[in-house]
Every structure is written in C-alpha cells, then in structure tokens.
Amino acid sequence: MQLGHIFQSIQSWQTLAALKMHPQTAYQILKYSKLIAAEYEIAEKQRVALIREITGITEGDATIEPGTDQFTDYVTRFNEILATESDLKPYNGSLYDVLAAVGKNQDNALSAQNIAQLEVFFKVA
C-alpha cells in the first residue's frame, strides 16, 4: 500500500476510531490506528520539509501559492513521496466484520467515502 493511501485516509481512521463498537474490535482499531498515525506523521514531516526546502524558509510558517512554479515543483515531488510503498501490513481482520461491529449501534455512521478510504487497509475476504 502506498503512503498516499495512509495520508488521505487519516480522517476516516479518526472517524472510525471515534465510533462505538465491541471493546475487542475497538482495541484492534486503536492499535491499528496508532500504526496509521505513525505512518501519517512520516508523510506529514516530509511534506513540511519539502515546503521548507522549496521556499527556503526554515522557521515560521512557509506557504506555497497555487499556480506558481514552486507549487508545480511541490506537487510533483510530494506525489513522489505519496507513491512510496509503506511497510504497513493490512489490518488483521475483514472490513465486513468491523462494519458489522460498528453498525450495531444506531448512533454510528460512516460515509461511503470513509469506507472507500478504509477499504484498502483490509484483507479481501
């Protein structure tokens, strides 16, 4: 799986982790979410370092304006980072089982977009 999948799915993992579910499933999701967060932090640090490198700003806020040559360079190079394969193993369980555990509580809700972003992390059943 690519680092881009992890980077783009962080909010979906946070949404899933906030839902009520059976304690055993919740614990498994917690453990896996920590692995996701660690991989996300790697990508985020690389993103910030890339912006700083391109702009030459080492302290404070550094931004790149869309439509500039710097932005084009940033997008190209950051996409290369996101295309990097992660060592993260798939979640040890099926998405169907997690959705069944989450779906037992009427107050829980995941969007189709959340599920689409999470699906890549689960073994195909």
Image (spheres, rainbow, N blue to C red):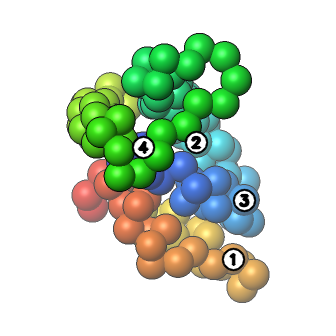
Horizontal relation, residue 48 to residue 84: left or right = right
Task: First in sequence, mark 3 or 4: give its number.
Answer: 4
Horizontal relation, residue 83 to residue 115: left or right = left
Query: Which is closer to the viewer, label 1 or label 4?
Result: 4
Residue 55 screen position, x and y as percent: 47, 25
Disc number placed over residue 6 in the picture, else none: 4
Q: CA distance from mark 1 to mark 3?
A: 9 Å
Task: First in sequence, mark 3 or 2: give its number.
Answer: 3
Residue 27 screen position, x and y as percent: 67, 44
Q: Secondary structure at mark 3?
A: helix
Q: CA distance from mark 3 to mark 4?
A: 18 Å
Task: First in sequence, mark 1 or 2: give its number.
Answer: 2
Q: Residue furthest top?
A: 58
Q: CA distance from mark 1 to mark 4?
A: 23 Å
Residue that carries the numbered disc 1 in the rendered image: 108
Task: First in sequence, mark 4 or 2: give its number.
Answer: 4
- Counting other residues with Cα less than 10 Å from the Cα at mark 4, is it few (<14), some (14-19), or many (20 or more)? many
| Tag 4 and tag 2, C-beta contact below 8 Å | no
Q: Secondary structure at mark 1?
A: loop
- Residue at 47% of width from left, 53% of height from top? 9
Residue 88 screen position, x and y as percent: 37, 31
Task: First in sequence, mark 1 or 3: give its number.
Answer: 3
Residue that carries the numbered disc 2 in the rendered image: 33
**115 and 123: which is toward the camera:** 115
- Amino acid identity at mark 2: Ser
